[in-house]
Image (cartoon, rainbow, N blue to C red):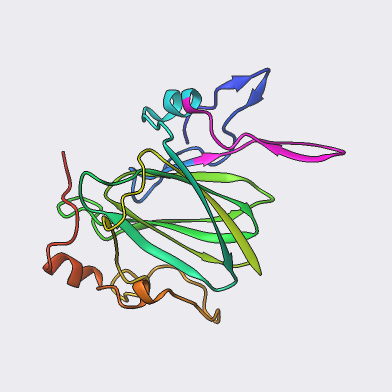
């Protein structure tokens, strides 16, 4: 667990903060919702606090959100070169299983992944650095994911590895009918992407 700085005596990053256990380059962020009779307010991201706790520079240059129906899988999406984006992601409505996969050839955690269940009623976020793939599946009837990115999206630079690749064995729920885009459905396996030279290197 990471440290928990306080503002006005309240934990900024409660339960869940810190590097992930299997792929430490993935950073998990617990968020602190403030609730009253009106509803809920959540500070999703604070650049200075995140950098102070994680030691990472995350200047937001683009923000996106996606709306997905139950069973929709998005990913595994990644960038293999200098046009990449680091992503800070959270679920703002509904529920998902979010996954980050280490695709960096030569990395000690190559091919391994971290997953976290994200539920808007218990806010949390994940920072996914460049070189790692990102995917999620929507568990609720509708799920809204917010993405903060440290670089603008450049069409044609994003790649994908097949999210149902048995070698990866990502934690998609049994019994859930999955919906993939045509691009993700026709994506190469992890081994195929590596053989074709499509994966990023591990930069030390």
Q: Quadrant of residue 170?
A: bottom left
> What x and y, as percent, mark residue 64?
50, 49
The verdict on residue 30 being magenta is yes
Figure check: 127 above or below 165: above
Q: Looking at the image, which residue is at 19% across and 70% down?
A: 191
Query: Residue most toward the front?
Result: 155
Query: Residue 21: image x %, image y %?
Result: 39, 47
Please name whichever residue, 107 or 153, is drawn nearer the observer in this view of the structure: 153
Quarter where residue 14 is shown: top right
Give how far across and how far down residue 104 sits, in percent. Answer: 21, 53
Task: Please indicate whether residue 126 sits to the left or right of residue 78 in the image.
Answer: right
Residue closest to the eye, 38 or 101 = 38
Whether the magenta-drawn stretch holds residue 78 is answered as no
Number of residue marks: 0
Position above or below: 28 against 187: above
Quadrant that contains the C terminus? top left
**Residue 1 screen position, x and y as percent:** 47, 36
- Residue at the top extreme, as displayed: 8
Residue at 37% over, 70% down: 163
Give the side of residue 66 with respect to residue 7, left or right: left
User: Which span of residues is magenta-colored?
Assistant: 29-47
Residue 23 left/right relative to 200? right
**Between 118 and 162, which is closer to the camera in this rendering?**
162
Which residue does the image show at 12% across and 62% down from the upper left?
Answer: 197
């Amino acid at each position: 667990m990471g440290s928990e700085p306080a503002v006005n005596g309240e934990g900024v990053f409660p339960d869940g903060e810190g590097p992930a256990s299997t792929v430490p380059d993935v950073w998990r962020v617990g968020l602190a919702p403030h609730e009253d009779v009106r509803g809920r307010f959540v500070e999703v991201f604070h650049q200075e606090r995140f950098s102070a706790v994680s030691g990472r520079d995350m200047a937001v240059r683009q923000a996106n959100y996606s709306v997905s129906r139950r069973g929709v899988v998005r990913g595994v999406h990644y960038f293999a070169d200098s046009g990449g984006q680091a992503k800070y992601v959270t679920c703002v409505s509904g529920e998902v299983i979010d996954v980050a996969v280490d695709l960096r050839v030569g990395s000690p955690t190559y091919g391994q992944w971290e997953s976290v269940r994200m539920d808007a009623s218990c806010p949390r976020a994940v920072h996914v650095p460049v070189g790692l793939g990102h995917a999620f599946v929507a568990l609720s009837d509708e799920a809204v994911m917010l993405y903060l990115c440290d670089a603008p999206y450049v069409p044609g630079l994003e790649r994908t590895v097949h999210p149902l690749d048995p070698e990866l064995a990502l934690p998609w729920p049994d019994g859930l009918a999955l919906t993939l885009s045509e691009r993700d459905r026709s994506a190469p396996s992890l081994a195929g992407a590596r053989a074709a030279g499509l994966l990023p290197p591990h930069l030390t």
